[in-house]
């Protein structure tokens, strides 16, 4: 490394290369936007060339910046892992691990927590519910260390660990709905009524995976109400305002007398995945990932979309 090179400059550059926005980078690193600009400028002076192009409308890396990021990322990750491994070896896996979950903590997650606690009694595990409509926000804000979320996950900077609980989807409908008397449905049946969807900061590809706009054959699915929480969706389904696709563990956990839960074929299976932020990865998150992989049956790589 060049004499006097600051690790904070490298961290800032890597964060900016993912966010491509000075304000979001500052929020992610808990520093001001002007401080982000100062760190990037200082790094560019050390390098002797521009790494980032800034305009009033966009931020992007220069070709040299792209090459620098490609070379820097594995070296930075290796350095961080070495420091973390040394700390873990010196202290053991201690402290606190915050595990986020959507809707309900599945049995596999509870078993993973028990396995993790038995292996690492010096680490306290907390289970924290994260909003249905914002599956990745808590990870980006470092409010949780790792989270079990509905797939798919295609977010820059996030690492997808074990994928588990791959099962057929279930449609929640009012007990007065014509589908309530059915023992099974096909994806094409979804064209017959409104489908409740999720609104909020979740990326569009994720929201469409939870509530597709068309059947496999291309028939449009009527849009229903948009909700921000699971309980809102279940309540509207019970009131006959629409149907809601759920993963099997959620349907099992939220069984209620005013709703019927009918399995749906012809759609990709739903699946859950353990996710964490690459920048905040620790020995604790890696150890919990191992515990979850040991406690939960895993499956092959997920298909492009996984409705709830």
Image: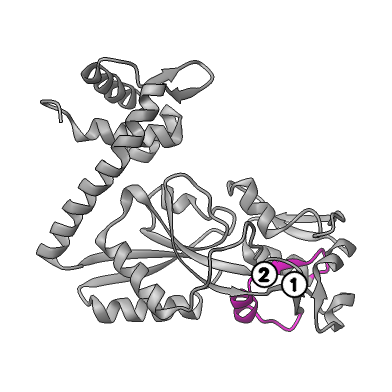
Q: Which residue is drawn at the image coordinates 20% and 67% (left, top)?
A: 94
List x then y, in percent, for residue 202.
58, 49
Q: Determine whether, in the image, residue 167 is placed left or right of residue 188.
A: left
Whether residue 26 is situated above or below residue 99 in the rendered picture: above
Give the magenta-colored segment's residue range: 239-258
Please check the rendered image and state whether residue 220 is part of the magenta-colored stretch, yes or no: no
Q: Name the residue under label 1.
A: 171
- Measured as percent of width and height from the top left, residue 181 is found at 86, 83
Q: Tell whether label 2 touches label 1 (CB within 8 Å).
A: yes
Q: Residues within 10 Å of mark 2 (few under 14, many from 20)?
A: many
Q: 276 left or right of 244?
A: left
Q: Examine the structure image and report whether residue 252 is included in the region drawn in magenta.
A: yes
* Mark toward the start of the polypeptide (1 vs 2): 1
* 113 versus 219 height, above or below: below
Residue marked by disc 2: 246
Residue 167, position as x, y percentages in the image = 62, 75
Residue 165 visible in image = yes
Q: Which mark is residue 140?
A: none
- What residue is drawn where x is 63% and y is 78%? 254
Instruction: Name which residue lies at 65% across and 77% down.
Output: 251
Q: Nearer the viewer, residue 256 or 119?
A: 119
User: In percent of the image, x 31 and y 35: which residue is there?
Assistant: 71
Q: What element carries label 2?
A: strand
| Left or right position of 86 against 209 | left
Q: Is residue 215 left or right of residue 139?
A: right
> Where the C terminus falls, by quadrant?
bottom right
Question: Residue 235 versus residue 220: which sits nearer the camera?
Answer: 220
Foreground pick, 290 / 26: 290
How many angstroms separate mark 1 from mark 2 (CA)? 6 Å
């Amino acid at each position: 490394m060049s004499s006097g090179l600051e690790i904070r400059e490298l961290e800032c550059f890597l964060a900016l290369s993912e966010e491509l926005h000075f304000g979001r980078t500052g929020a992610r690193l808990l520093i001001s936007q002007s401080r982000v600009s100062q760190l990037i400028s200082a790094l560019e002076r050390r390098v002797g060339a521009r790494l980032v192009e800034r305009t009033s409308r966009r931020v992007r890396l220069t070709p040299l910046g792209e090459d620098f990021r490609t070379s820097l990322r594995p070296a930075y990750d290796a350095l961080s892992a070495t420091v973390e491994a040394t700390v873990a070896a010196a202290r053991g896996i201690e402290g606190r691990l915050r595990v986020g979950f959507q809707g309900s903590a599945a049995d596999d997650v509870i078993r993973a927590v028990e396995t993790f606690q038995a292996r690492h009694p010096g680490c306290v595990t907390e289970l924290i519910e994260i909003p249905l409509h914002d599956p990745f926000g808590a990870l980006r804000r470092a409010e949780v260390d790792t989270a079990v979320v509905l797939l798919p996950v295609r977010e820059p900077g996030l690492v997808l660990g074990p994928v588990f609980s791959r099962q057929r989807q279930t449609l929640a409908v009012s007990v007065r709905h014509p589908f309530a008397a059915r023992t099974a449905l096909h994806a094409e049946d979804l064209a017959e009524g409104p489908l409740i969807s999720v609104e909020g900061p979740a990326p569009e590809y994720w929201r469409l995976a939870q509530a597709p706009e068309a059947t496999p054959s291309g028939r449009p699915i009527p849009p229903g109400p948009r909700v921000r929480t699971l309980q809102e969706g279940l309540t509207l389904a019970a009131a006959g305002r629409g149907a809601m696709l759920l993963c099997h563990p959620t349907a099992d956990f939220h069984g209620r007398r005013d709703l019927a839960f009918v399995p749906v074929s012809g759609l990709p299976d739903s699946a859950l995945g353990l996710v964490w932020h690459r920048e905040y990865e620790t020995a604790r998150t890696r150890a919990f990932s191992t515990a979850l992989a040991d406690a939960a049956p895993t499956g092959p790589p997920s298909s492009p979309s996984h409705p709830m």
